[in-house]
Image (tube, grey):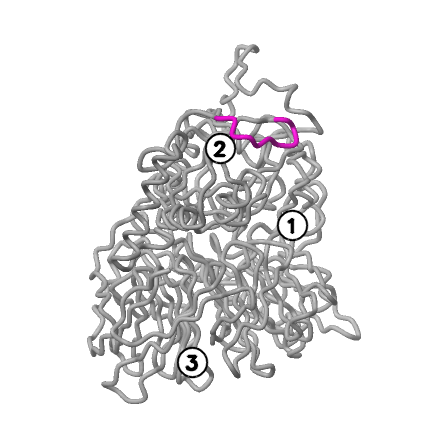
Amino acid sequence: MAMNSSKFPIRTFTARPSFVIVALCTGLLGPAMVVWSNQPSELSSVDRKGSQPVVTALPLVSPETKLHRRPVAVVAMGANRAVVANRRSGTLSFVNTETLHVDSEYQLGGHPTDVVRSGQSLLITEREGRLSAVQVNDDQPRLQWQVAMPDEPATVRVSSKGDWCSVCSTWARRVTFVSMPKTNGQSPEVLTSVELPFSPREQLLLPEQARLLVADAFGPRVAVIRLDDFQVESIREIPGNNIRGLTLGRDGENVYVTHELINEIAPPRSSEIIWGSMVSDATREISIQSIVDPEASLMSGSRFIAVGNNTRGAGDPNAALMRQDGRLLVTIGGLGQLGVVEPGGIGVTRIATGKRPVAIAEISADRFLIANELSDTLTRVDFHADASVVRKLLNERGETKQNETPQFESKPYDKEEYSSSKYEAESYRTEDYDTRDYDLDSDDDGESEDADYETQSYRASDDPEAEPIRPVRKIASYQIGPDATNEIEALFATATTLSLGISPELEPADRGEALFFDASLSRGGWYSCHSCHTDGHTSGSLADTLSDGGEGAPKRVLSLRGVGQTGPWAWIGDKSVIDEQVKQTLRLTMQGRRLNDRDVSDLVAFLKSIPPPPVFDPSDSEADRLLLEEGRHLFETLDCVACHSGHVFTSDASYDVGLDDERGTKEFNPPSLRGVGHLNGLFHDLRATSLEDVVGKFRHQLPRDLSEEEQTQLIRYLRSL
């Protein structure tokens, strides 16, 4: 796989069956990331010619400037200061965490995906493919240097000594290591680049064990890397997908991993959804001992901590961080909440935040700052051991009368909240059924099946028509966990939310983005569209969604990258209009709150805004280009283009290609081959684990045997799409 150019020499180590890979990273908390922007950048373009030592003052943004900011990362810069990286606006917001006020905002130049602190500097990854260092030890932040990175870097981590940093580039499947300049004026040096067998994202350093964890951005894999010789010790899996948080326990004996788990044998019946059987939202406690033993199962001695419980889902758990008292903080992205998990793992108190909380920064032992990506807000959560402190805060803001006991918002599960009667009135409902009893296109009753879309209405919380943005929301108060016992002290919390600035009017795709990441579209709030189609791509899992006309035949979750161009939709290709596929998914698979026509149109607008996947393995030499051309010739002469034609490499029809599912279905619409190299499982049921399997083992639709040389040529071409 080719890497972006750099003028520094690069040593590359490629993952092989022996798992010999180089990596060296650290981690605290990572942001969530959508890897495209719905508006073109108005800022400077990226120079990919290597490192650039510069000392340039960042331009100041006027407080009156209307911007869609989309905060994705936040880092503490002292007791009363934090810096927020805003993905879409390409800005950095400097926030006073005591007064909850945005002191200033500066243009960075690209679209940041992560930010960490290194001394008095910030290290920032940008979607355009670069790592930037910004000095902030005076009132005017200054750009110190930049260095090119492989395709779309997602996270950056810095060593405890600040002498090196690591960058995970998701689409490039690489970890790049950069030596930090020792003095001002020096350039950073790219030390090495590592190719992984999965798309890396989250990173966590285990300093006592001299190990590093790197987690899959989409699927279940984690790499364990020794730091003494920079060799990959093991690549293993956990049952789950969407790994969005890695944090170390306070005792140093366990790692906590936030993820979701799609159950391929559970169809979207009402009971399977509401009890979390179809999709589970969890944190998994994994012992350090099992991590450092390459022969041990990561599940040996592990503990499954249900963040979603009873009939209350916790769709899309994101960043995680553990308090000093052993309580685990987990942002619940799909519902706009912070979950506070009790030390024993039983009991979760939910604190309301903004829309899609994705990152946490620890300001002090009892103060945390949450970045809410889709409402352009921050939520400060303060914990208190004394309820009188909370009462005083509420009194100061006129929230309660003097001497009145504060009304804490934490409450136990209310079975009425998710009762069947409520869902019959306000959401889609199915019972245990065989969809052969349903004619999905029938209108025999004289009423359009889309009538529900006409009568229900909804506005996103960040829609200015629904709720004007205010600088600071009123304080909400909570009692955390159970009442005080001999073992656990009572704990209280207040949550205050700050707007990062003025936002322009939302476009349809903006509103659709909020719906895509909204877990309330599913019954009980267990999952969003993102839960299966991670960041618009795919979790790589199997799921039984009823989209093929019935249950009992789970299918591979398709990527939505470039989905607006790849109709017809669904594995059986029975939806010629993408709006109809969306409505069927909402009705049969999600079964949550209903959307009106405008909402469906907004969601479709967002789906159409998702670009195609980047090229998996672009050509990097003349010899490679010749190999690729030979593969292209084979692709055409072997008549692969009969099904995978045009620039999107699909077609309108469905074909019998010698595969069938558990229900006997034999004809499928061919998925687009664009970016096919990014997938770790192929065919409708994942029976092929690689392109080598498709061509060599299954000889998929090949009219003749291919020589080893021809197989190499054809596979090389497919990897270039």
Residue 252 or 69: which is nearer the viewer?
252
Residue 333 or 93: which is nearer the viewer?
333
Q: Is residue 608 left or right of residue 55?
A: right
Is 690 located above or below residue 212 in the figure?
above
On the image, the x and y values in percent for residue 703 come to 45, 33
Main SS of the magenta segment? loop
The amino acid type found where label 1 is placed reads: Ser
Residue 657 shown in magenta: yes
Q: Which residue is mark 3?
A: 78
On the image, the x and y values in percent for residue 486 come to 80, 75
N-terminal of the two: label 1 or label 3?
3
Q: Which residue is mark 2?
A: 595
N-terminal of the two: label 2 or label 1?
1
N-terminal of the two: label 2 or label 3?
3
User: For the residue labelled by badge 1, is the local secondary structure a helix, a strand or a loop?
Assistant: strand
How far apart marks 2 and 3 lie (CA) works out to 44 Å
The amino acid type found where label 3 is placed reads: Gly
How far apart marks 1 and 3 lie (CA) works out to 37 Å
**Alpha-carbon neighbours of circle 3 within 10 Å: few (<14), some, or many (≥20)?**
few
Q: Is residue 617 left or right of residue 692?
A: left
Residue 328 or 16: which is nearer the viewer?
16
What is the magenta range? 655-664
How far apart marks 2 and 1 lie (CA) works out to 24 Å
Find residue 632 and report its image quarter.
top left
Q: Image point 47% across, 74% down: which residue?
A: 22
**Alpha-carbon neighbours of circle 1 within 10 Å: few (<14), some, or many (≥20)?**
many
Is 472 located above or below residue 575 in the figure?
below
Callout 1 touching callout 3 (CB < 8 Å): no
The amino acid type found where label 2 is placed reads: Leu
Is 293 located above or below residue 397 in the figure?
below
Q: Which residue is mark 1?
A: 280
User: For the residue labelled by badge 3, is the local secondary structure a helix, a strand or a loop?
Assistant: loop
